[in-house]
Image (cartoon, rainbow, N blue to C red):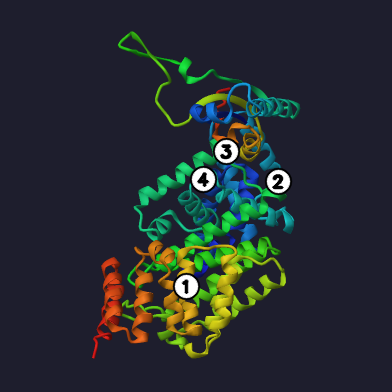
Amino acid sequence: MKYACMIYTSEAANAEQFPAGSPEFNEMIAGYMAFGEEAGAAGVLIGGDALEDTSTSTTVRVRNGDIGTTDGPFAETKEQLGGSYFLECKDLDEAISWAAKIPGASHGCVEVRPVPDFG
Amino acid sequence: MPTPERVLAQLVRDEWPKLVAVLVRDLGDLGAAEDAAQEAAEVALSRWPHEGIPDQPGAWITTVARRKAIDRLRREKVGREKTELLAQLELRQPGPVPVEIDLTEPELRESQLGLVFGCCHPALAPDAQIALTLRSVGGLTTTEIARSFLVPEATMAQRLVRAKKKIAKAGIPFHVPPEHELLSRLDAVHQIIYLIFNEGYAATSGDEHVRTNLCDEAIRLAALLASLVNDDAETFGLLALMQLIHARSDARTTDDGDIVLLEDQDRSRWSSDLVAAGTENLRRALRLRQTGPFQIEAAINALHDEAITPAVTDWEEIVVLYSKLFGYRRSPVIELNWAVAIAMAEGPDAGLALLDAPALSESLDHYRYFHAARADLLRRRGHSAAAIVAYDRALELSSNDAEVRFLTRRRAECTPS
């Protein structure tokens, strides 16, 4: 079964806890690289990407044929989507055990949701 | 005197967890498993009164259920997966004659455990876990579960449908968790069973039997769990605790529905069978040498239950046990119970000193039992005016008729002479 693991952390807290270039930041990045390697080696990682900050977001809504855009994410939330991984796991327990290894799970959270198979 | 229908229905319900577990293993889908189980149960209940109970009721129902599942699969639009599943099932069901269930005892145990762990998976909301466990393991009908929890039947039906949908779509597995997760997952199952028990405990004599029977259901579930995981001390501890509490249920209320406190209960109305069973299960727990909070609470209740009169209750030992309990759970309510025990062991002043500690009295200010307990100790001490103030506070917080009557009576006993 395919699962999306969506990583939610507070960008404001991240700026404080993991300032760019700091040892904490480097450790966090190393954690993500290690996860990618481990999940890849286990044959579980299908894909995924990090995202730029929500300050770079643009939200598109089309109503009555009009394309409207607003600056920023779709809603103001306490934690923001920072990236996702797509994993192939045999069941939810396996997906959960991988999600727990994602660094974001330790200071934010990871939402695990199945990807439907329309095949 | 149970009617033949009730006897048969109970027989079917006794087989239910094994039946559903085997079908889930066969079909990989809880909904399909339950549908097949339900159809087979209906066949059994309509045929057994005429044909007699088969030698192996479990095997009989399972065979019929599997056949129903096969029929259903044939009728549905089948994709490749289902065609393969159908072929596998048909291989195992060569003829119409009921055969032995083709699983070993360990496989049967494992399947039932998997069913329990799946129903109590943390990815499901607690309400959903409770409903699923009662339905799929306990064999209660949706109607019975709805009535047990004072919820409209449609709501309960929806809750079950949503839970099964999540199980299917999110891939919640029905298996025994790996070693490193086993204890914490078992703990989650314990909590669900205990929630069911407490719902039954909260039921009043005016409620339907199906609601007061939740205590029996919880005990059945814990007994099943103990038979499947026979080396977990806290499972036996939980079972013992519930039996030892439920043993006193007949004496807890008067015919009018008034509360009778432990010290005033007619102990001849306690169930000696349940006390014996609870005590034996506590012993089994302790022999496993894995101490834990359910065992400690069971031990406290065992001390109450073995006291022939309130006066011979071993309060000193109860105080020691509460101190041990603090190592696991330290809540204001447990501290309250501990203070009451100390009052019994050492006198009201000792208890009052603890209850008046600012940290405790602040955190329990909205808890009516705190004020009732304080009032009681003050009353025993002869501090009538202060006792009346405390009873008034408890009455303010009380909404239950029986409690109000009880507290009012006690308050009246305080009129300063």
**Residue B73 numbered mark, or none:** 3
Q: Chain of mark 3?
A: B
From the viewer's side, name the closer residue of B325 and A65. Answer: B325
Mark nearest the camera among 2 and 1 is: 1
Q: Given the image, on which type of amino acid does mark 2 rest?
A: Arg
Q: Residue at x 36, y 67 (%)?
A: B208
Q: In terms of secondary structure, where does tag 2 sit?
A: helix
Real-space CA distance between mark 2 and mark 1, rounded to the nearest whole angstrom: 57 Å
**Labels 2 and 4 positioned on one and the same chain:** yes
Q: Position of residue B307 (x, y in %)?
A: 53, 87
Q: Which residue is mark 1?
A: B337
Q: Are marks 1 and 3 in contact (CB under 8 Å)?
A: no
Q: Given the image, on which type of amino acid does mark 3 rest?
A: Leu
Q: Which residue is mark 4?
A: B124
Residue B323 versus residue B250 in the image, above or below: above
Q: Are marks 3 and 4 in contact (CB under 8 Å)?
A: no
N-term mark: 2 or 1: 2
Real-space CA distance between mark 1 and mark 3, rounded to the nearest whole angstrom: 56 Å
From the viewer's side, name the closer residue of B46 and B229. Answer: B229
N-term mark: 2 or 3: 3
